[in-house]
Image (tube, rainbow, N blue to C red):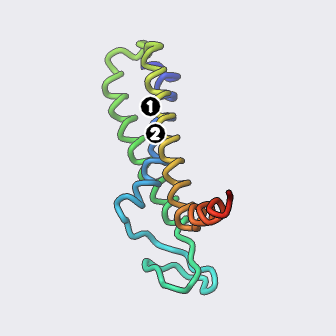
Amino acid sequence: MKKSDLSFVLTAVFTSAVGFFYCGASWWNINLPRYYPLEHAWKMVKEKGVPSQGWYGVQVFAFVAAATLTLLVYFALKSLGSKNPDKSLSPTAHKLIGLAATGIIVFCMGFILYQEFSKWGVFTEIKNCCSCLP
């Protein structure tokens, strides 16, 4: 596989995997560290009534998991492509990989927005606001 094709595939894998694993932290209820800015401390538990930031732990999980997956794909493609290093991906393969990565990213971004809007009560506010309209 050509270097440019390998770079394209690995970029698509990494970007879509970051979104997937970011959402996966919620789907699989993974307990990740949270930062408590008032205490300047990291904890594995979510304390009620105390402001905390779980975003940092989720980001680290998503990037490390995506990097690990990308490395596995890299080694797999290198071993498969070592037989014919000058072979390039077809235009159809480029389109399918691009569409798959874009679809995963858009789905995951939509899920993240839905989850955050639910947590913040945005949907409830919209419902309350719209119920007063004639």
The C terminus: image quadrant: bottom right
Tag 2: residue type? Ile
Is the C-beta separation of discs 1 and 2 under 8 Å? yes
Query: What x and y, as percent, mark residue 103?
Result: 48, 35
Q: Counting other residues with Cα less than 10 Å from the Cα at mark 1, is it few (<14), some (14-19), or many (20 or more)? A: some
Residue 14 at least partly seen: no
Q: From the viewer's perspective, is residue 115 above or below residue 106?
A: below
Q: From the viewer's perspective, is residue 125 above or below residue 67?
A: below
Tag 1: residue type? Ala
Quadrant of res 88 = top left
Point 50% across, 66% down: residue: 57
Query: In terms of depth relative to the viewer, which is nearer, 8 or 95?
Result: 95
Quadrant of res 97 = top left
Query: In terms of depth relative to the viewer, which is nearer, 41 or 23?
Result: 23
Position of residue 37 in the picture relative to residue 109 (left or right): right
Residue indicated by mark 1: 100
Q: From the viewer's perspective, is residue 101 above or below residue 65?
A: above
Position of residue 65 in the picture relative to residue 40 (left or right): left
Q: Counting other residues with Cα less than 10 Å from the Cα at mark 2, is it few (<14), some (14-19), or many (20 or more)? A: some
Point 62% across, 62% down: residue: 131
Point 48% across, 22% down: residue: 5
Query: What x and y, as percent, mark residue 66?
Result: 44, 47
What's the CA distance linking mark 1 and mark 2? 6 Å
Point 54% across, 86% down: residue: 49
Residue 72 at least partly seen: yes
Residue indicated by mark 2: 104
Looking at the rendered structure, the secondary structure element under dot 2 is helix
Query: In terms of depth relative to the viewer, which is nearer, 65 or 38?
Result: 38
Position of residue 39 in the picture relative to residue 23 (left or right): right
The N terminus: image quadrant: top left
Query: What x and y, as percent, mark residue 18?
Result: 48, 48
Q: From the viewer's perspective, is residue 133 above or below residue 80?
A: below
